[in-house]
Image: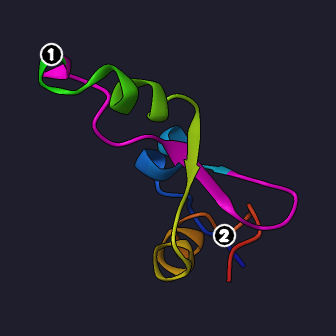
Amino acid sequence: MSKMKTKSGAKKRFKITANGKIKTHQVGKRHRLINNSPARTRDLRGMDALSVAETRRVKRWMPYGGGI
């Protein structure tokens, strides 16, 4: 049987943690940052975890990373 393919866009954007959660970059940190308050910009540092519904969908795209 042939191997399943991983979506190439998903492997560039998401990382799976040891507990099965999916980490991704923060939204709203790319451009137009002058409109954000300094507190908002600080809050957007680091990684963010996806919701349960989005986690199910992304795991289908990554079958060998703990997918469903």
Chief secondary structure of the magenta portion: loop
Residue 30 part of the magenta-drawn span: yes
Where on the picture, by quarter, is residue 44? Answer: top left
Q: Amino acid at mark 2?
A: Pro
The residues colored magenta run 16-33
Closer to the camera, 65 or 2?
Answer: 65
Q: Which mark is residue 34?
A: 1
x and y percentages locating residue 62 in the rendered image: 60, 63
x and y percentages locating residue 28 in the rendered image: 27, 37
Closer to the camera, 49 or 10?
Answer: 49
Quadrant housing the C terminus = bottom right
Where on the picture, by quarter, is residue 46? Answer: top right
- At mark 1, the secondary structure is helix
x and y percentages locating residue 32 in the rendered image: 12, 22
Residue located at (25% from left, 25% from top)? 37
Indicate left or right for 31 with 64 as reference.
left
Answer few, some or many: residues within 10 Å of disc 2's Cα (few below 14, many 20 plus, some between 14 and 19).
Answer: some
x and y percentages locating residue 3 in the rendered image: 68, 67
The single residue placed furthest to the right in the displayed view is 18
Indicate left or right for 35 with 29 as reference.
left
Indicate left or right for 35 with 5 as reference.
left
- Say which residue label 2 marks: 63
Quadrant housing the N terminus = bottom right
Q: Amino acid at mark 1?
A: Ile
Q: Give the Cα separation between the discs numbered 1 and 2.
A: 39 Å
Q: Earlier in the sequence, mark 1 or mark 2?
A: 1
Residue located at (20% from left, 20% from top)? 33
- At mark 2, the secondary structure is loop
